[in-house]
Image (tube, rainbow, N blue to C red):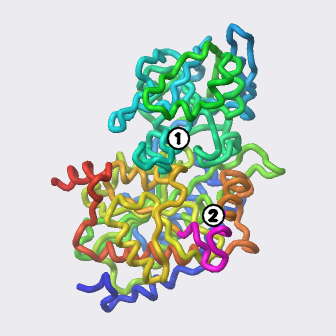
Amino acid sequence: IAIGCGGNNNSKEAENAITAESLGKQIATLSSDEFLGRKPFTAGEEKTVNYLKSEFEKLGLKPGNGDSFFQDVPMVELTPAPIKGITVTSAKGKSDLKFAEEFIASTPLVEKEVKLENSEIVFAGFGIVAPEYNWNDYEGLDVKGKTVLVLVNDPGYDTQDSAFFKGKTMTYYGRWTYKYEEAARQGASGVLIVHETGPAGYPWQVLEHGAGTAKLQLQKESNGQSHCTIEGWVTYDAAKKLFALANKSKEFETLRQSACQRGFKGYPLGLKYSLTIQNSIRTANSKNVIAVLPGTTRKDEYVFYTAHWDHFGVGPTVNGDSIYNGAVDNASGTAGLIEIARAFSKLNVKPSRSVVLLAVTAEEQGLLGSAYYSQNPVYPLSKTVAAINMDALNVVGKMKDVAVIGYGHSDLDDYITTAAKEQGRYIIPDQTPEKGSFFRSDHFNFAKVGVLALYAKGRFDHAEKGKDFAKEKSKEYESQRYHQPSDQYDPATWDLSGMVDDLRLLFKVGFRLSNESTFPQWKNGSEFKAKRDQDMGK
């Protein structure tokens, strides 16, 4: 049946149901002050998930988890008492670091009080153990019970040598979550990452605004005991102060360059500090929202669309505003999820496969909602054809390009290339791979469990004003609105035409997938292929 190519279906009419007017209304609602920044465990969550349920019901979609639109996600919230700072000492003297301004720290341990007393600081390069690259920053280092200080990103970023790690493209080894995990595996009690805007992919104020606020994590039997006691960051200037205190100012001048050399050995800094964190603890369930458009002839196979509904709620006041509305991040993607659902509901012949709309919680807390779903799937992973993710969509107008984050991993590249050509657009890989965007949104948790994942949007080549304009707008958002109260819906300056193009594009891809009988595959060389092959019985 040629439904996937049009057939006697009204796919074009369905695609055109995605409009700027409807998107604007949805974003305006979801990012309004009434929704209180959509933070899990707040009144803003209750309002958000009930709103999504209502919108999906209006479109005729069915509950996606049995007879419920919700999947409970058990989480624990740790709210720290205020921290003023730490004093770092050496044989030479001491140096004070101010909390939020120069360092941030929190604990993943579900305990009312945790302490590090006179913890020694050891510099451990990039904090990476990567056998496939013959790399071990911890070799010969004694870090048990100590605090490791590590650099952000990975050695490839500095060398730009594509044969070294992945060159400019961040590997998972460069991600802060990996560095926390590896430090714990090495027996460290604390881990501090040296922040730099370029290799981190975002400015210090992104971290600063979340400093000292309540943190969420999934409930686990270990209560966080498999992690380091203290996890955190220091600014570049604070790290410079620490190396000066350690009488290693010369070493600091070439720190990243030295740490990129194969065979580089870390070293103790001769520094110590103490830190106590007191927490109030709350456990509760947050919610993923799941809706489904049941398929016809292959209804036990599933095409997913995902977006995270959450943001940061009410937080530190910036320029007189304390509500983090998250209009771009990610009221835009959540609105896109509703609009995709609207398009599929307009089809006069429903797809052969089922289409699932999954709005996940707590992405901003570390991709928690999608992590929980991937470990507790409602639908078999082996029957899940692909997951198409939407996060922080384009609000500056039409783009010529479609940037595919993680391009080269799977056959989905071919699907989106075909759909892009129909729009007169071209496909490019992510042009800022050093930011590690592949690891920073919910598609990653699907990829980790073997499900093909697509994350793509117009980003780098504005249709009228070109590449420099697109770059300027991206930088402006990152520095002035990303994870700040100023991320608000602005109908006067926003141009949603590019967002409409992207959503229609993603609808085309999902429509094709939902009417096929074959399963696209990971490409040879992708690290996600082995898990998929195992699940598919290969």
Q: Is residue 230 left or right of residue 10?
A: right
Mark 2 to mark 1 CA distance (whole Å): 33 Å
- Establish if 94 lies above or below 303: above
- The residue indicated by pointer 1 is 153
- For image coordinates 38% across by 59% down, the residue present is 453
* Rendered location of residue 281, percent (x, y): 58, 30
Q: Which mark is residue 30?
A: 2
Question: For numbered disc 1, what is the local secondary structure?
Answer: loop
- Queried whether the magenta region covers residue 310, the answer comes back as no
Question: Looking at this rendering, what residue extends furthest in the right direction?
Answer: 320
Question: For numbered disc 2, what is the local secondary structure?
Answer: helix
Which residues are the magenta region? Answer: 458-471
- Establish if 252 lies above or below 407: above
Question: Looking at this rendering, what residue extends furthest in the left direction?
Answer: 538
* Rendered location of residue 178, percent (x, y): 46, 37
Q: Quadrant of the C terminus?
A: bottom left
Question: Looking at this rendering, what residue extends furthest in the top direction?
Answer: 91
Q: Which mark is residue 170?
A: none
